[in-house]
Image (cartoon, helix red, strand yellow):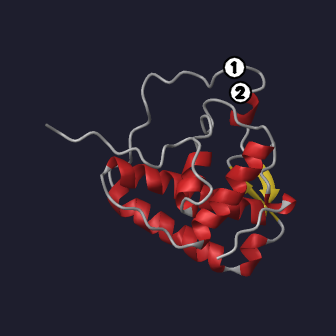
């Protein structure tokens, strides 16, 4: 599969406020006393919500025009790429934390890699959003390269219990 990075698919500086404003202003998000709790039925809700996202993104109209996510107006094609990136990186995080293999379809890491590469080339690599880029060889699998651009070490495994 050939992946393309285009300026049309590059992340907008306004794609994720207020998080993107914390970096240039050198401020931090408001402190929370503890992380929010998962809903009681999260095991049922998460697969349903992910299925709805997948179905919605199958509609070609979802990739056109303007949409709104997280209080931000952005083009549908950017929203789709951002969603793919979220699924790739956090899917990898969860699989790695659980000691499981992660094998998304080819298109998702391709979209994530293009998005993260554009962000890295744009110089928008603030701490707290993705973390510093982790160098990965050019010949590495695309998923590993996307994970590295997302500030994760693709070779890192969770510690084993004694």
Task: Tell me the SS state at disc 2.
Answer: helix
**Number of dots carrying numbers:** 2
User: Residue 19, how many percent across, how many down?
Assistant: 68, 35
Q: Quadrant of the N terminus?
A: bottom right
The quadrant where residue 129 appears = top right
The numbered mark, 2 or 1, whose residue comes first in the sequence reads 2
Residue beneath the point at 49% across and 71% down: 51
Q: Is residue 15 visible?
A: no
Image disc number at residue 138 = none
94 shown above or below 36: below
User: Residue 143, how many percent across, how many down?
Assistant: 54, 60
Q: Quadrant of the C terminus?
A: top left
30 shown above or below 54: above
Task: Tell me the SS state at disc 1.
Answer: loop
Image disc number at residue 22 = 2
70 shown above or below 68: above
User: Residue 95, how many percent across, how many down?
Assistant: 38, 55
Q: Residues within 10 Å of mark 1 (few under 14, many from 20)?
A: few
* Residue lying farthest to the left in this orientation: 162
Q: Is residue 11 visible?
A: yes
Mark pair 2, 1: CA separation: 5 Å
Residue beneath the point at 73% across and 35% down: 20
Q: Nearer the viewer, residue 83 or 107?
A: 107
Q: Residues within 10 Å of mark 2 (few under 14, many from 20)?
A: some
User: Residue 15, how many percent across, how many down?
Assistant: 76, 47
Residue beneath the point at 55% across and 51% down: 147
Quick check: marks 2 and 1 in contact, CB under 8 Å? Answer: yes
Q: Nearer the viewer, residue 140 or 82?
A: 140
Residue wearing tag 1: 27
Left or right of 89? Residue 67 is right
């Amino acid at each position: 599969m050939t992946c393309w990075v285009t300026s049309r698919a590059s992340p907008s500086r306004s794609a994720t406020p207020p998080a993107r404003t914390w970096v240039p202003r050198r401020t931090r998000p408001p402190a929370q006393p503890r992380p929010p709790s998962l809903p009681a039925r999260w095991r049922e809700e998460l697969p349903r919500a992910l299925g709805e996202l997948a179905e919605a993104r199958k509609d070609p109209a979802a990739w056109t025009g303007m949409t709104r996510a997280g209080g931000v107006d952005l083009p549908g094609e950017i929203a789709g790429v951002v969603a793919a990136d979220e699924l790739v990186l956090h899917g990898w995080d969860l699989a790695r934390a659980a000691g499981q293999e992660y094998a998304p379809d080819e298109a998702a890491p391709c979209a994530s890699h293009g998005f993260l590469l554009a962000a890295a080339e744009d110089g928008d690599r603030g701490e707290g959003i993705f973390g510093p880029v982790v160098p990965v060889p050019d010949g590495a699998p695309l998923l590993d390269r996307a994970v590295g651009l997302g500030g994760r070490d693709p070779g890192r495994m969770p510690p084993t219990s004694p």
